[in-house]
Image: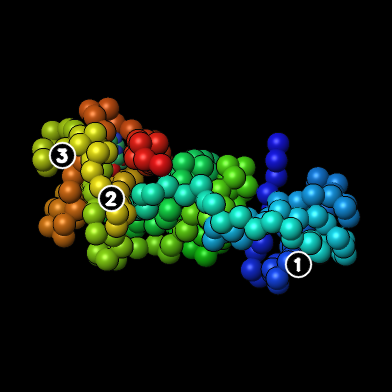
Amino acid sequence: MSEQYYLDPTCSAVTGSEAVLGGDEAHHFLKVMRGKSGDPILLFDGKGLRFRGVVETVRKMEIGVHIFETNSASAESSVRLTIATALPKGDRQKFLVEKLTELGVARLIPLRCERGVSKVDDGVLERLRRQVIEASKQSMRSVLMQIGGELTFAGLETAATDKFLLHPLDDSAIGQTPLRSLIDAEWANGLLFAVGPEGGFTDTETTDALQSGFRPVDLGPRILRTETACIAVAAAVLCSFR
Ligand code: SAH
């Protein structure tokens, strides 16, 4: 399997045709992959650039690379998709971040909901961002999915122009449209889907969201878990556009 290494700006840098790779990534190259001087290597900066080079120097947990090719062809979708969701707990949270990264979601915003079950502190965000790097390496994405700080619905007001509230087709008829009707539209400014916690959005949250311009969308009459709903909508949208 081809490997790409992330140039974390806190410990790595590119200057002209030379790069320094440090931190966990250098450790991985040296200790896990048993890399050495003279090896070819692929680096990415998380903002859309990928560098092909050869390892020139190996110092204690720091690798010097000579770059001979820079590529800006990214695997990003033409649709900028944001998922704002109440994060599930534990392994489901990790699974969610991994799959949304693979699918090409541009941004994940943890959404504070009345029935939310997960605490979102700096430690959690740091762990999730690490997860994004891992999934990007595996899926050959060269732009990192952004993970913002936790927001409430009010904080999402300017997050995107086209905002949708995912709500199951149950007794609470709120005028949902099927997701299919969104797929063929033009989404130049990107779009955002809000997904609720396991307990669902409260009536107040739903009413407020609809009043502030969210449009209701359903994924059918089956109730999906939070992470399944996020992944399903990301797959439906991002696999329909290039
Ligand atoms: N008992 C809750 C279920 C919540 S499921 C309720 O009835 O609302 C968790 C979240 O996933 C929901 O808040 C919604 O945002 C999303 N979701 C689950 N199934 C869905 C479906 N069929 N259509 C649209 N959204 C769905």
Residue 106 vs 226, above or below: the answer is below
Question: Real-space Cα distance between discs 1 and 2?
Answer: 38 Å
- Name the one closer to the observer, 43 or 94: 43
Residue designated by label 2: 187
Residue 11 vs 179, above or below: the answer is below
Question: Real-space Cα distance between discs 1 and 3?
Answer: 53 Å
Which quadrant of the figure has residue 24?
A: bottom right
Residue sitting at x 70%, y 70%: 16
Report how many numbered discs are placed on residues in the image: 3
- Name the one closer to the observer, 118 or 173: 173
Residue 114 vs 3, above or below: the answer is below
Image disc number at residue 18? 1
Q: In which quarter of the image is the C terminus?
A: top left
First along the sequence among labels 1 and 2: 1
Q: Residue 208, image x and y in percent?
A: 16, 57
Residue sitting at x 86%, y 60%: 56
- The amino acid marked with disc number 3 is Gln
Image disc number at residue 176? 3
